[in-house]
Image (cartoon, rainbow, N blue to C red):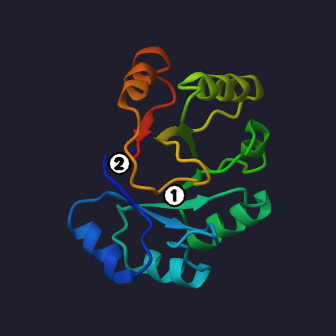
Amino acid sequence: MFHIKICGITTTEDALMVARAGADAIGVNFYPRSPRYVSIEQALAISEVLPAEVVKVGLFVDSPAPEVCATFDRLGLDLVQLHGAEPPEFLLRLGDRPVMRAFRVGPGGLDPVVQYLDECRQLACLPQLVLLDAYVPGQHGGTGTLTDWSVARKYQQEVVSPPMVLAGG
């Protein structure tokens, strides 16, 4: 697992800079409506300059499973980050590709996360990691808004597995 992931990398220069600064994971965003969206070609260039030990994460929002799988395989990604409304069954369609499932923590607190993970357990498709991000209406993440850390503490105390990643805000 990584300790520091910088998401939204759009250039090879930025990728090298964050790797040199100590980030051990980078995220490239394949959501076309994001200002940090990158094409497959841009992501390939970024991937090629990174040191082998840097974890490469592809961020997807409601993309079709075949597209996620093809992108993961073509780029040699290490982790799929799902940041949309993908149901637990979607994880099954990704095969054995490791998944970090993002949740925007809002008024429901931890309850939607626990319910989702319970469904995943029933289907035997538990994600490898859970990312907790701030809820901002109409946004899928990357807003710079601080996540409710009390929910993160509660996750660590009550849920524990899969391991949690906390978005920086």
Q: Position of residue 49 (x, y in %)?
A: 38, 80
Picture quadrant of residue 40: bottom right
Report the front residue among 60 and 161. Answer: 60
Residue on which the image places disc 1: 78
Q: Position of residue 29 (x, y in %)?
A: 54, 67
Label 2, label 1: how many angstroms apart (C-alpha)?
A: 21 Å
Residue on which the image places disc 2: 168
Report the front residue among 87 and 150. Answer: 150
Q: Residue at x 44, y 77 (%)?
A: 10
Q: Residue at x 31, y 46 (%)?
A: 3
Q: Residue at x 50, y 72 (%)?
A: 36
Q: Which mark is residue 110?
A: none
Question: Of helix, strand and loop, which one carries label 1?
Answer: loop
Q: Earlier in the sequence, mark 2 or mark 1?
A: 1
Give, as a three-letter code, the residue at label 2: Gly
Quadrant of the snapshot with the N terminus: top left
Q: Name, please, the residue furthest toward the top.
A: 158
